Image (spheres, rainbow, N blue to C red):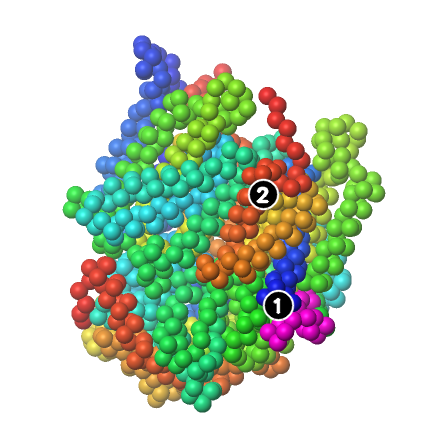
Amino acid sequence: MLYREAGDFKTSYQEDSQTFPIAFDRYRYWAVLAFAFLVVPFVINDYWANAILVPFLIYAIAAIGLNILTGYCGQVSLGTGGFMAVGAYACYKLMTSFPDVSIVIHIILSGGITAAVGAAFGLPSLRIKGFYLAVATLAAQFFLVWLFNKVSWFYNYSASGQINAPERTVFGVPVTGPNTEAWAQYLICLVFVTVCAIIARNLTRGSLGRTWMSIRDMDIAAEIIGVNPLKAKLTAFAVSSFFIGIAGALFFAVYLGAVEVGEAFGIQKSFLVLFMIIIGGLGSIFGSFAGAAFLVVLPVVLKLIGVDLLGWPTDLVAHFQLVIVGALIMFFLIKEPHGLAQLWRLAKEKLRLWPFPY
Amino acid sequence: MSADFLYGIEVIINGLMAGVLYALVALGFVLIFKASGIFNYAQGVMALFAALTLVGIMEGEVPFSHLINAVFGTEIHHFGWEVPALLAILLTLVVMIFFAWAVQHFVFRHLVGQEPIILFMATIGLAYFLEGVGDLMWGSDIKTLALGLPQGGSLWVEDITSGLGGDDFYGFFIDKLDMVATVVAIVLVTGLILFAQYTKQGRAMRAVADDHQAALSVGISLNFIWVLVWSLAGLVALVAGVMWGAKSGVQFSLSLIALKALPVLMLGGFTSIPGAIVGGLIIGVGEKLFEYMIGPMVGGATENWFAYVLALIFLVFRPQGLFGEKIIERV
Amino acid sequence: MKLKQLAAMALTATLAAGVASAELVIPDLSYRTGPYAAGGTPFSDGYQDYFNMLNARDGGIGGESIRIVECETGYNTEKGVECYEATKGEGALIYQPLSTGITYQLIPKATADGIPLHTMGYGRTSAANGEVFNWVFNYPANYWDAASVMVNYLLEENGGDLSGKKIALIYHNSAYGKEPIRTLEELSAMHGFEFTQLAVDHPGQEQKSQWLQIRRERPDYVLMWGWGVMNQVAVQEAANIGFPMENFIGNWWAGAEHDVTPAGAAANGYKSLNMNRIDANLPVFDDIRTLVHDAGNAAGDGSNMGSVLYTRGMYAAMLAAEAIAKAQEIHGVSAVTPAMVRDGMEALEITDARMEELGMARVGPAFSVSCQNHGGSGLGIVQQWDASAGNWVALTDYIAPDMSVIQPLVAEDSAAFAAEAGIEPGCL
């Protein structure tokens, strides 16, 4: 009842194949966007921006990127942290070398540089598959982190090897640096997320996305029907790295403002983003958001409940947090191996019939 | 012989020894992957947990004491007894077997037939869970492992070999702990191979690894075999945890040794026990030699990434790893 | 998206519950979990116990009670940012971020928000220049001081001449570990010793290559900038290759009890720097024991009292409390704001008499802070591990660093930062 598709007639192919063919979904989508763009910026404070929303949005971009590679093209990658580092350091070098160019252009260019690096590290995927590839991408992860740590050109020869984001503005409003307002930080991330999600959605349902999915489902069969695996795999690596690079640039410039490569873009980051897409749902844009929300928000909520409501010692809460997150991951996988996105689809099925299941 | 050449040999010998330690960790991965197709991310945390449990039992610590104290306001820490090492090892094994059963019963029984990446994800959940439980049970401070394992360079080897080179050569350095680890690893692997070849359960285990359905149809209990392989992986984890923990004390960072095993696995193949050993040795020697010869030119600390790059180069020529099953693709 | 909104509503409800009141709020960004928990726990225990003791004994500072807000960071930068944002709304007066990563993160944030940071013996060294870093204090000493103190100690050991000696630095391959390199290079040129560097990658469990190299090259001294598991392994490996332990000197984050105990008797003779003298019989411990531990308010399980890092945490708390008292004195109000605390820190003067009065005689060096110098005196001691007794023995009195080397480096690095960040140096 609540969720209706009956009576929603389509009179053209275009209408039939739009992203949200059901009117209710469409309204919900516009409502969420309107809420995110028109309401949240006016009520947001520093805590909300820095602790929850900005990391959530940035991880969502990274998760979308990895989902393209892993969820749509079937190539498991553990190099996400390294590629994010490429985006961050590219952004830093661009920001400090060309201070007069807009930061937005720098961030997009960083994505482009990361895409090139990603495609280069994607070459072994032509020979190596499955978990072997996952482990092979770790070579990229460790090598890139070592490189950024070792070559002082990347951090402008500063004594400590940290990079700091100088202040840059968009339309006169600072979006990086210490004087950034919470809403500006939030909005620039939101704009990037929205654009990235729309691009990703349209890429994945277009012909490029279909070639990726054919490679994922059965690469030999795909090759036989005329899909070029070289092109498909490398484009997947490039597009995926483009998004991850943007996420890395935002992570450094807008969210943290100062990073050290080993700590911010270490192997844990690669695993974290992979967890997000598996929990959220492989091969689903919505899943990328859901997974990012799950892993960013859940620890904060658990901490707030444990420390602020129950008043437990912080170390106990931190230990319990691990136990609960671990148990929840296993529970979700047992109940629904295809992630939160599948749960959402099932919920929609249920809602469609509710309250008259027969 | 020139000192440089001899030092090169010393680096190779030490690389081989380090390789044995890597192989020990990798072995745990292979056992589980072979029998159930699960890539067990939690192997490193299992090593940590096993070592923590061993120390906890030996020193008679009260499990969950921190939690109990926080909830009930009590002040308990120790039972006041100390358990001899051998008994403590046996008790730890009992704990690991119980853990294996629990993992099988509560998690993987429900996930039979899922895609590998889902199973992988579940082991990640398991890793988080076990890490939290380990911290809650035994606390998060660094513990000293008092098993009395020998440590330090062997003076005997040093004396014998110091005459080989000139004045610049001080004799080969070989760590006694590494020698012990090598012996233990040889015993462990021989034991595992004998077990797999000559016992009923071992043969059943190999049958399951070959073909689940066929094994099931001749009356082998898959559940039992899976509990068995997780228990064996627990045993391997305990040995790995003890060997690494003897060096650094038992602490959280032990769980990171899993990362050292990944290139080994890649090189040796996920499904081959000899592969894990040979892969470990190649990685150990390769990374140490690279650090010795090329490292100083590029600023050092290359070992982490070089292991992966080495494995990657091998893989490009043999995508299934050195000893992995040949990938036959059909449409 | 739905999920997020639901969570959002739940969160607003919980957040609204904790509104600030008129107390002195002091956040404690601790790390009792994760790979560095063994170091974070005693520090945090000492930090909290001291403030709790002040509450019980003096009713807080200047009549205002202290409220500690503990937030677990797990040594993770992102969690540290979350903790900062969560606690700053409660009126936090002073931050002790306890990690180099979190410090770098908070320097611009805290400066913009006007909350002082105290990074005691860690963080950004050039923050010693208070004209550029108005809100950041790293007294009593920093890493470059530490490097210089080590060399000065070695000079003293060798009758003032290090020329021709070989000194190796084994360091954690991160921002933290790379800190002393510049200073040591300068000092090597000045005193004519041969300086080599050995990087150890995080986490540092595998150091065989590095120690084999040390064994081959036989340096006269090995200095260490290590942290976490790297320390325990390094001490063990040094003993393994038979390196004379008395020539192996760690910095002050590589010189706690838990760094040497796993190696057992082999660690005997290992030296490290310390910025706080340890003494288990300090009168202040009696107060903490009776007023805090016996009252059941101990921050941890009470087992760490008197250890290196516990003492350091307590020392940090003392410095914060003194700064707050100073701020109350300057501004004549008891309910101070973060800006006032900053003034208090900048006017801080710690004398031997004052420390004696506080029951912690000679725990730290005497020093004073000014707008130009946020770094204190830079003094440090050298201590040695006695494995059979299981404690650290102070070998020297406070040793002074060579400020003529460090000052230009601080000036250069802070000037570079000021140029990059667009800061006009000057006093507030």
Point 25% across, 41% down: residue: A105
Point 54% across, 21% down: residue: A221
Q: Can residue B289 be spotted in the picture?
A: yes
Residue B197: x %, y % from top left: 81, 42
Residue C74 against residue C285 in the figure, above or below? above
Q: Amino acid under label 2?
A: Phe
What label sits on residue B314 in the rendered view?
2
Q: Mark 2: which secondary structure?
A: helix
- Real-space Cα distance between discs 1 and 2? 31 Å
Looking at the image, is mark 1 or mark 2 earlier in the sequence?
Answer: 1
Q: What are the residue bounds of the magenta stretch?
A: B159-177
Side of A78 relative to B26 (left or right): left
Q: Mark 1: which secondary structure?
A: loop
Q: Quadrant of the C terminus of chain C?
A: bottom left
Point 39% across, 54% down: residue: A148
Chain letter belonging to callout 2: B
Depth order, front residue of C52/B43: B43
Number of disc labels = 2
Residue C42: x %, y % from top left: 48, 70
Point 61% across, 64% down: residue: B5
